[in-house]
Image: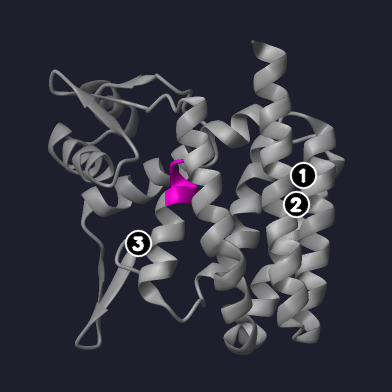
């Protein structure tokens, strides 16, 4: 069970996770799906009132997110980082180098549970695309990737890719609002899921790289159009 899950099992006793961990999970999910805008300030007191909790666990969660690079700090406050074009290029470079190999390594160990999780996430992505639901598609996209990434044998590689994915919300904001980008991403998810289901590691690796290249192309186009 993950360290940030809502419940933890110790010595056969199930207890609720610390409140700060639950807040951390909630905020991390919002950051991953782009529900906070780049540059947006996050005020602990305001967030505490919204969540009906004290400021202490909120600040603990925000501090943890900042330590992981998911928030920036300035004069004791917190904000969503505004990634530069150079930052995003570096993120894509890391993904190109590491992610296809990580997906390939997950093929022999993904198992029935992983394939089921991948299939369910893909169904949610299809539904979100039909409904033109950006936020739903962004969440489903994260779940599609998480279905195999959670099972990648190399823990350090898995943690590195999670960290870079968490920092790439600006990319999803810039690309997945475009229905064409969502359609292309969905096609790649279909390819990747089919390759996982047949145990074809070479195809999983190839389609994962193609997904990254597609995302990079849409990001470059969106950036050029905005300049």
In the picture, the disc for residue 6 is 3
Q: Quadrant of the N terminus?
A: bottom left
Q: Residue at x 59, y 56 (%)?
A: 96
Of mark 3 and mark 2, the one earlier in the sequence is 3
Query: Mark 1 or mark 3: which is in front?
Result: 1
Q: Residues within 10 Å of mark 2 (few under 14, many from 20)?
A: many
Q: Residue 133 at x, y = what percent?
A: 74, 36
Q: In the rendered image of this protein, does residue 120 appear above or below residue 82? A: below
Q: How many numbered circles are shown?
A: 3
Could you tell whether 128 is left or right of 62 in the image?
right
In the picture, the disc for residue 5 is none
* Cα gap from disc 3 to disc 2, whole angstroms: 25 Å
Q: Residue 42 at x, y = what percent?
A: 31, 24
Magenta run includes residue 151: no
| Residue hosting label 2 | 125
* Cα gap from disc 2 to disc 1, whole angstroms: 5 Å
Whether tag 2 and tag 1 are in contact, CB under 8 A, the answer is: yes
Q: What span is in magenta?
A: 164-168
Q: Quadrant of the C terminus?
A: top right
In the picture, the disc for residue 128 is 1
**Colour scheme of the picture:** one colour
Whether tag 3 and tag 2 are in contact, CB under 8 A, the answer is: no
Q: Residues within 10 Å of mark 1 (few under 14, many from 20)?
A: some
Dot 1 falls on a residue whose secondary structure is helix
Could you tell whether 49 is left or right of 25 in the image?
left
Q: Residue at x 35, y 61 (%)?
A: 6
């Amino acid at each position: 069970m993950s360290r940030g899950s809502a419940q933890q099992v110790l010595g056969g006793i199930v207890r609720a996770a610390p409140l700060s961990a639950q807040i951390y999970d909630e905020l991390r999910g919002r950051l991953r799906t782009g529900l906070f805008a780049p540059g947006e300030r996050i005020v602990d007191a305001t967030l505490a009132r919204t969540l009906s909790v004290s400021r202490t666990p909120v600040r603990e969660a925000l501090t943890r997110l900042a330590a992981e690079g998911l928030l920036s700090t300035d004069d004791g406050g917190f904000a969503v980082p505004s990634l530069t074009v150079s930052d995003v290029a570096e993120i894509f470079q890391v993904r190109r180098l590491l992610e296809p190999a990580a997906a390939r390594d997950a093929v022999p160990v993904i198992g029935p549970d992983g394939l089921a999780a991948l299939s369910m996430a893909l169904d949610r992505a299809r539904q979100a695309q039909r409904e033109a639901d950006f936020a739903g598609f962004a969440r489903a996209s994260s779940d599609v990737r998480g279905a195999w990434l959670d099972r990648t044998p190399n823990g350090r590689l898995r943690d590195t890719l999670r960290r870079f994915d968490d920092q790439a919300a600006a990319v999803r904001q810039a690309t997945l609002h475009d229905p064409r980008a969502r359609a292309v991403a969905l096609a790649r998810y279909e390819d990747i899921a089919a390759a996982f289901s047949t145990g074809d590691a070479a195809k999983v690796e190839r389609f994962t790289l193609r997904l990254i290249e597609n995302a990079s192309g849409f990001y470059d186009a969106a950036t050029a159009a905005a300049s």
